[in-house]
Image (cartoon, grey):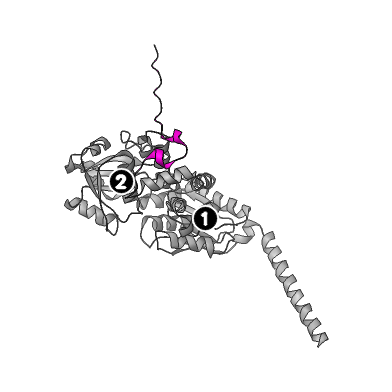
Amino acid sequence: MTVYRHAALTLLAAGFASLSLAGTAAEAQTAEQFYAGRVLTMIVSTGAGGGYDASARIVAHHMERHISGHPTIVVKNMPGAGHAVGARYVYNVAPQDGSTLASLGQNLPMAQLLDPAKMKFRMEKLNWIGNVTQENNVTLAWSKTGITSIKDLMQKELIVGVQGVNSTSAQFPLAMSNVLGAKFRLINGFSGTQTIILAMERGEVSGLGSIAWATVKSHHPDWITQHKVVPLVQIGTKRLQALPDVPLLIELGRNAAEKQVFEMLSSGVYIGRPILTTPNVPADRVAMLRKAFDDTMRDPAYLADAKKAQIEVDPVSGADVQAYVEKLVTASPDAVKLLKAALSAKSIFDCAKLVNDKSLCEKPKKSAKKG
């Protein structure tokens, strides 16, 4: 019996040693060796056919040529719970070795900031590879309303359809109502942007709380050429050349508190249509994926396909998106309180009562005129 036990222990020890050596060998692989001939998975957190899906599939098709070792990238859709299903899979289930890529919802970092326990993932721990485009969103009015600027909304109501209280179609109008006093009436229950558009064209609602300006240009050019809509506010980090006179949401903030809220709400545009991978991926693999992404964004064949699909390419590097996400999700408790109040249908946005740092609520002093 002792002999058998000794033999069994010897075999078990040999097995552990073998596994250890295999793990060491895997870790010793160069990034090129790891990716050589491998099949990678690209998780898209929406259904097939949408903007995220189209963008991710074109990136996957071209990016595989720019990764040393020339792997194949297979796209899989994993929709649900406002992009959270896909994010939870990538964070909690997928192999953490660089073999899983993903395109996840741009507003997930802000969702994590608002309710980290519910989300069950940490967006800052993912490895961000890059963002394909920075598409400014716009809040717009149907021209027949006579509303021509955000100032008009202080006196006249704009009725907008929304997909749900957590969608940007609701968040932007809610924030402008709560923080600035703009008059929006939200009609909930629409299944998507297209159903809201149809309702607006039929006169059932009078505006859109959020739509990408790129979508307006590509899918509804007559709105622009025939002056059917009036952009009131654009949401992004910089004004579009096509809309030089339309204010950014972040420009409407009258003090530091309001500017913080509007900056956080605008964060999704900078994150855009992202490509990322799981946590704990070896640094050389992350570096290779980031370089492959950057090379793809300059690839004439990719740019041609993106143009055919009417995808505007305005990329952000993986390192820059990573730093941006890390800053966003570590916002101060005061900033989180302000954001929650701005997005609440019940809470009153009273800056002085919400924050400990009262200086956030002070309006900037006007500089004395010279002369």
Residue count near mark 2 (Cα–Cα under 10 Å), binned few <14, some 14–19, many ≥20: many
The answer to which quarter of the image holds residue 6 is bottom right
Check contact, mark 2 vs mark 1: CB within 8 A. Answer: no
Q: Amino acid at mark 2?
A: Pro
The answer to which quarter of the image holds residue 255 is top left
Q: Secondary structure at mark 2?
A: helix
Q: Quadrant of the N terminus?
A: bottom right
Residue located at (32% from left, 37% from top): 243
Magenta-tinted stretch? 349-369
Q: 371 or 35: nearer the eye? A: 371
- First in sequence, mark 2 or 1: give its number: 1
Residue 351 coordinates in the image, percent (x, y): 39, 39
Q: Report the residue marked by disc 2.
A: 173
Residue at far bottom of view: 1
Any mark on residue 211, and which?
none
Q: Report the residue marked by disc 1.
A: 122
Cα distance in 3D space between marks 2 and 1: 27 Å
Q: Quadrant of the C terminus?
A: top left
Seen in the picture, residue 103 relative to 231 is either above or below; the reply is below
Residue 12 coordinates in the image, percent (x, y): 74, 77
Residue 223 coordinates in the image, percent (x, y): 23, 45
Q: Answer whether residue 358 is magenta in the image.
A: yes
Residue 60 coordinates in the image, percent (x, y): 47, 57
Q: Secondary structure at mark 1?
A: loop
Q: 113 or 352: nearer the eye? A: 352
